[in-house]
Amino acid sequence: MTVNNNVNNQADTPKRIRIFDTTLRDGEQSPGASLEPEQKIVIARQLAKLGIDVIEPGFAISSPGDFAAVQQISRELQNVEIAGFARAVKVDIDAAVKATRDAARRRLHLFISSSDIHLDFQLRKSREQVVQIAREMVAYGKQFVDEIEFSAMDASRSGREFVIEMVEAVIAEGATIINLPDTLGYAMPEEYGEMFRVVRQQARGGDKVSYSAHCHNDLGLAVANSLAAIRAGATQIEVTVNGIGERAGNCSLEELVMAIETRKSAIGAETGIVASEIYETSRMVSRAMNFPIAYNKPIVGRNAFQHESGIHQDGLLKNRNTYEIMDPEAMGIPRDMIVLGKHSGRHAIKHRLNEYGVKLDDTQLNDVYDRFIAKADELKLVPDNVLIRLASETTEQQQDPYSLIDLQVLAGTQRSRIASVTIRERDSQQEQTYTGSGTGPLEAVIHCIQQAIPAAGEFEDLELHSLSTGEDARGEAVVSIVHNNERYRGTAIHNDIILAAAQAYVAACNQQLMSSQARKTTPSAFNKDIV
Ligand code: KIV
Ligand code: ZN
């Protein structure tokens, strides 16, 4: 990390926190987020690359697909510990034990509720009965697996003495890790930390086991509560990628890890997470689980490292530490920190145009700026293709190598979709029309543009966002292409989303061509490290 925030802190050696990822179990309980076994395997591979210590790949008893996914992940990922998840009943334990049999390292994760409300209304059992079940099931599981994690579900809303009684009972039967979940996301950080302190100190054998926190985010406190648990002695935190999970979700992996990383000495802890894999993991999970990431989500949200205010942009262009506490590139997040809108200043506009190799004198810059502000009022955010068009109008010279002149698409319910796209090439001043087909209109358009523009790079992603509602709603398209490990993103806004997507793709291609040209002529003009 290059960011120096210069805040004083504790000097002790940081304590190593184990990250237990339950995206594929608790995260999958998020409405609409269910995964095919093959998708789980792909995500689990990425979690291993991210440096997760323990993966909980699913709930083996819940379906043949989940059983198969847990089994396959246990077989394949020999460098990660695998948790087999089970209710405190024999059939669940048998399934979890069987599914994880081929793991190089495994644990059994057993749970039963500890709160009176769950006992009375859900389990319909007395406290004595529940302790007895927990005891018997831990002893049963221990015959097969050494490492037993026991979770007292709804611990934070349970009577303290009863949690202690239950924890003592399961430790006596061989539980090695005690998880005290805040199942409903109800706890305050002080209370949650205090529960860990009291249980560790007062439960017989409580100093012989390790502790885990599992926090839900109903009050937006999952990360704060997990940090409180770390301060109170927990050495494992259960998280999900993007904070996905039941209701408001679980403790977000990326937020927790980056809080620990960014404030390492204040928190006195560290993790084994490979920060540079965070963004890729987040995107993969978001796509596979059809779960969009809120724009303002810390770390991985699209706005998390973007600045629109002219004052901030000016500060950032001088020294990024003025308005940033983390370096997005260290998390694999493409650095396009400056979004252009009506609060942006001349400095930021000039900087963005320079990135494309477009140089303006002061008079031209003033002219572009005036028209830019008018555009910003209309569009709210000014995408790069529009900015370059403004520069072309000012200089009376087409600046982008290729521009989209016309687009026609034939869509329908039968047969493949057909498109034709007319593109003008700056250097030859020629216009040419290309035709293409695809299974959808967008694919057909993409095929046309690929014929027209010789940009290097793989089409990586297309995101469509609705910017307003109603029949004339405007959509924003963001297209990214990747070339030589560099990501080029083009954005465009229109109430025709196919046109917006086409313009965004052309913009991304232009960006790739213009930036490699700019780099060739003035290598320092494209130094992404602008500090
Ligand atoms: O939220 C919760 O309590 C859980 C446990 C079963 C670990 O997910
Ligand atoms: Zn949970």
Image (cartoon, rainbow, N blue to C red):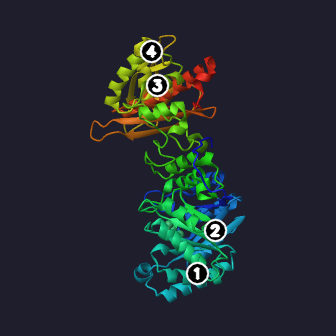
Q: Residue at x 62, y 41 (%)?
A: 2
Q: Quadrant of the C terminus?
A: top right
Front-most of residues 6 and 426? 6
Q: Earlier in the sequence, mark 4 or mark 3?
A: 3
* Left or right: where 284 falls relative to 78: left
Q: Residue furthest left?
A: 471
Quote the CA–CA distance across marks 4 and 2.
Answer: 68 Å
Q: Earlier in the sequence, mark 1 or mark 3?
A: 1
Element assignment for label 3: helix
Front-most of residues 330 and 424? 330
- Tell me the mark number nearer the camera, choosing from 4 and 2: 4
Disc 1 CB within 8 Å of nearest ligand 1 atom: no
Query: Could you classify mark 1 by the number of other residues whose Cα lies within 10 Å: few (under 14), some (14-19), or many (20 or more)?
Result: some
Query: Could you classify mark 3 by the number of other residues whose Cα lies within 10 Å: few (under 14), some (14-19), or many (20 or more)?
Result: some
Element assignment for label 4: helix
Q: Quadrant of the N terminus?
A: top right
The correct choice, above or below, for 275 with respect to 504 in the image is below
Q: Residue at x 50, y 59 (%)?
A: 223
* Amino acid tagged 4: Asp
Dots 4, 1 in contact, CB < 8 A: no
- Residue position marked by numbered label 2 in the rendering: 99
